[in-house]
Image (cartoon, coloured by chain):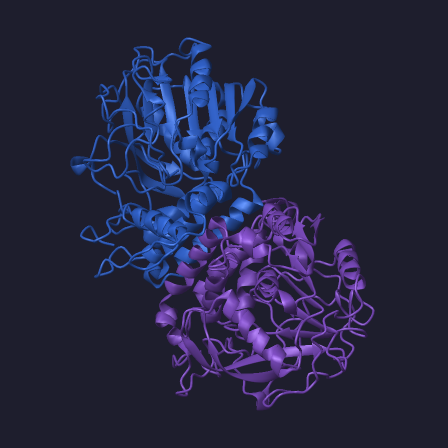
Chain colours: A blue, B purple
Amino acid sequence: MSASSPLPVSGAWRPGDAPGRRRFCDLGDLLLESGITLPEVRLAYETWGELAPDASNAVLVLHALTGDSHVRGPAEDGHPTAGWWDHLVGPGLPIDTDRWFVIAPNVLGGCQGSTGPASDAPDGRRWGSRFPHVSVRDQVEAELALAQRLGIDGWALVIGGSMGGMRALEWAVGHPDRVDRLAVIASGAAASADQIAWSSAQAAAIRSCDGFAGGDYYDAPDGRGPQKGLGVARRIAHTTYRTAEELADRFDNRRRAEPDGRYEVSSYLDHHADKLIRRFDANSYLVLTAAMDGHDVGRDRGGIAAALARVTARTLVVGVDTDRLFPLSMSERIAEGIDDARFHVIHSVFGHDGFLVDSPALADWIRDLLGGRSGRQSARVVAVSAAAGCSDPARRQEHADAHSAELKRSP
Amino acid sequence: MSASSPLPVSGAWRPGDAPGRRRFCDLGDLLLESGITLPEVRLAYETWGELAPDASNAVLVLHALTGDSHVRGPAEDGHPTAGWWDHLVGPGLPIDTDRWFVIAPNVLGGCQGSTGPASDAPDGRRWGSRFPHVSVRDQVEAELALAQRLGIDGWALVIGGSMGGMRALEWAVGHPDRVDRLAVIASGAAASADQIAWSSAQAAAIRSCDGFAGGDYYDAPDGRGPQKGLGVARRIAHTTYRTAEELADRFDNRRRAEPDGRYEVSSYLDHHADKLIRRFDANSYLVLTAAMDGHDVGRDRGGIAAALARVTARTLVVGVDTDRLFPLSMSERIAEGIDDARFHVIHSVFGHDGFLVDSPALADWIRDLLGGRSGRQSARVVAVSAAAGCSDPARRQEHADAHSAELKRSP
């Protein structure tokens, strides 16, 4: 899948030609949990609002598996999707960018500008199959390095849903003194056997694709990659993101009349598969799902209960009542383990994807969480100084598209 | 996938070299629901017990997607699996072969001896991609033709689970005068959008496999076929057959120590995928899942309620409380629509696969159903006469393996 591929899926852009409003920060080497050092790590990120002089108003928003830094704004100018939390982040919205400085990094291992398997390794060739396993903790460490480069010593709030919730929780467990408030939405403290099972089928679909070529498909002369396998993975994943009831209401067992008589639900899944393979790198999909499979805040910390007991943040835990991928019990377990936690349930027909849907209740819970304390209470206020290699973080947010009530279907 | 393939998956054997205890019946042409005529149709089947002179004691047992005619008996001599209802069918068992003549055909479109895509077409080449769509109703019509060749005008009981339950229900709706008793277990009156969604991902996995070759892979010189895609399909399907709770109890997020550190649940799914690709034909998998997707007893009959109202059989409907593929509501809907129906729930940790597990309750319900009337009450008793081209159906059942309490995992 070269740059001229008909299906461009890699976001391993250089800072000079960064599409959209992404910025980049070079972090140098990153020592991974595995003991391997990943060299020349870069994170892409976007920001909204202004960082306060004492850096006390920084909010970290963490995206889900196929999401990216584009939390708000239109799908244009190199941003493959519209903002996935347009209704939660912005002026006057629950995460009010007139008050808070919001930063959303692309995850380490992803494909929207942060270092991942589609990036060039130091030898000038794509990482491909050589890209090492990264854990959720490694991803958090990269985000910590980014924060430090931007002069942010701690967060007024770390918030994320699904895979983003895994990172958010890891932040609060691994660095409790850096997280004042925490919001974990439709996520879990550790991957479940069921989640790993679904992930296994998806990984098998990608790896068994002839175009995968062991992960080194970037230089295939015809731009051929494991798109078909990634499409199968997406069909599986998307079905786990929704509910049987919603699919029944929308599609039942109806067929399209023309031209091919496909079932409406099959056509719907084909559409989502087709969309993803045009914007996402299959190797990143494997790297990120492997990180999710390995997510376990209790690992090497005496178990989940002991890990959750480390959290000092004022915490909001939210589950979706119909979520069949991250069932409510996973959210309850987090809430029960954290001292200062409130637990709320979104009632939704959408299942796991309910966390992406505009929900007045979720908006209220986030407002409450942020209203409870004004700014960061820590004494560890540091000077604002954009470190070498990083863009100025305090770029003013441009008013983006009007709030979209349409459901974004890609968590 | 030629006969010398390392992964023999086709059961398109000739009667002369039929492995195992299968028999075969040539049915001639079959006019399909689509209007297409499928020529030279043959069904493989097994029987246990003796047909009464008035043919009043015939029981039809219908297998699930990857099952076959081997309802009881060991996995040997050409039978790829042990009997899937060893605990329900046999002397002294709920379907008592000392009293009942039990016949289990392999489904039309399958790959264990009945005509399917791996069979030779009249031109001597494999059907492959040319095999037409067959519906559940077509499968029932083939079974009706088989019954008529064997001198069986009606059934004391038609029973099946999952896909077998779809055919059983179609029998009772389409031929109410030929079905005295009906048992539909873990099945539905029509495919749901959710089922079609899972099926779509599985079909995409097979069709996108390079080895699939559009469905004409049988003569690939290296025996290469869409085994990888079929394996992905099995991983998806198997996960839908179980429950998150059972997987959590068995595997949690543990990894195997050696040699590869795979997650235990991944290894488990790999194992089931590997088993299936060694015994099942990918084209059959597509043909049968397409039949299941199209299952709707209400089609062209004024809807499901009108169709169910046709059923005159004394009916047992059983659902599994944890079934996430055929949720309990699907069973309830059947029971509510049939005049003389009893509805029972299996409490099981196994989800959909619960219908294959030895259940004292299920055994009792089937005994009750069969005890309620002695033999077939119809006046339409016909003479027993094995028609031309068919084996003698009244072969004595050989005592098979001892009842196995082990869960069979392949519905």
Residue at coordinates 40% horizontally, 10% vertically from top-left? A375
Q: Is residue A43 above or below residue B374?
A: above
Q: Is residue A289 visible?
A: yes
> Which residue is situated farthest in the front direction here?
B379
Q: Which quarter of the image is occupied by the N terminus of chain B? A: bottom left
Q: Is residue B262 visible?
A: no
> Which residue is situated farthest in the right direction here?
B92
B115 to the left or right of B206 = right
Nearer to us in this view, A191 or A360: A360
How many tags in the picture? 0
Q: Position of residue B308 (x, y in %)?
A: 59, 55
Q: Position of residue B248 (x, y in %)?
A: 62, 45
Nearer to us in this view, A89 or B18: B18
Q: Position of residue B86 (x, y in %)?
A: 73, 68
Q: Which quarter of the image is occupied by the C terminus of chain B? A: bottom right
Nearer to us in this view, A281 or B29: B29
B13 to the left or right of A236 = right
A4 to the left or right of A322 = left
Residue at coordinates 62% horizontally, 33% vertically from top-left? A302
Q: Is residue A51 above or below residue B391?
A: above
Residue at coordinates 66% horizontally, 53% vertically from top-left? B339
Q: Is residue A254 above or below residue A367?
A: below
Residue at coordinates 51% horizontally, 75% vertically from top-left? B9
Q: Position of residue A141 (x, y in %)?
A: 41, 32
